[in-house]
Image (cartoon, rainbow, N blue to C red):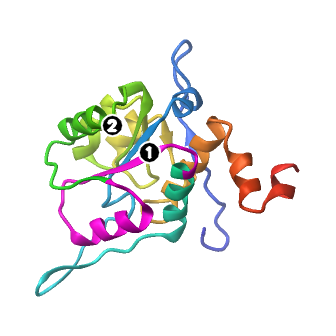
Amino acid sequence: MSPPGRPKRQSRAVPRAAGTVSPEARAAAVRLLVLDVDGVLTDGRLYFDADGEALKVFDVRDGHGVKLLREAGIEVAILSARRSPIVERRARELGITQVMQGAADKGTGLAELMQAMNVRPDQCGYVGDDWPDLAALAQAGFAATVADAAPEVRRVAHWISAAPGGCGAVRELAEFILRAQGRFDQLLRRHGGARLADA
């Protein structure tokens, strides 16, 4: 939620030169969405105690966005350079079965995920927020990022959320993809929002 007195930011599809594929068309082709963790599913802060990493904070709206994508038949995977049992647990809660952690080279990691899931690059979306994500973003047919990403990442993204990482950015992206694929209203009706979908 935006602070009082500050206008709410809007997520945006990044305009491209004439003749190039629009962000909406790229999102419409997505069959697999691959998510970075720190800075995308979380706010990027790392919490440690004497035994190591103690805590990660996730946004429940992001989790529901992941579930909506899966309900629409879109696979979701996690690709992270770090290793954390907390990520494994959160993935299980969301029904995400493809989890690759400890991936120092995310470009190679994304290629392996696409091969394992039999998905072409133009059918893959990737969400990252910092330089280690650049190689994966360059491979994916639909490159997305969060509002507080590194400037170099925002420069190559096809879509940028209004929310920062860990604060509903993945939910925004899920809704953008579902709208691009014409599935948003159908899912909304299924969840009891018939009057909203038909308005």
**Quick one: which residue is furthest to the bottom in this view?**
50
Q: Report helix, strand or loop for mark 1.
A: strand
Decide whether residue 84 is among the magenta residues.
Answer: yes
Q: Is residue 51 above or below residue 23?
A: below
Residue 60, given in percent of the width and then of the height, sits at: 51, 70
Q: Is residue 66 above or below residue 47?
A: above
Most foreground residue, 74 or 51: 74
Residue 179, given in percent of the width and then of the height, sits at: 66, 41
- Quadrant where the N terminus sits is bottom right
Which residue is labeled 2 in the image? 117
Q: Earlier in the sequence, mark 1 or mark 2?
A: 1
Q: Residues within 10 Å of mark 2 (few under 14, many from 20)?
A: some
Count of numbered circles in the view: 2
Kind of residue indicated by mark 2: Met
Q: Residue at x 22, y 36 (%)?
A: 112
Residue 93, given in percent of the width and then of the height, sits at: 41, 68
Label 1 vs label 2: CA separation?
9 Å
Q: Report helix, strand or loop for mark 2.
A: loop
Q: Residue at x 60, y 72 (%)?
A: 3
Please provide the residue range marked out in magenta: 71-97
Decide whether residue 188 is among the magenta residues.
Answer: no
Which residue is labeled 1 in the image? 75
Q: Is residue 109 above or below residue 119?
A: below
Does residue 127 appear left or right of residue 84 in this picture?
Answer: right
Q: Residue at x 54, y 31 (%)?
A: 23
Q: Residues within 10 Å of mark 1 (few under 14, many from 20)?
A: many
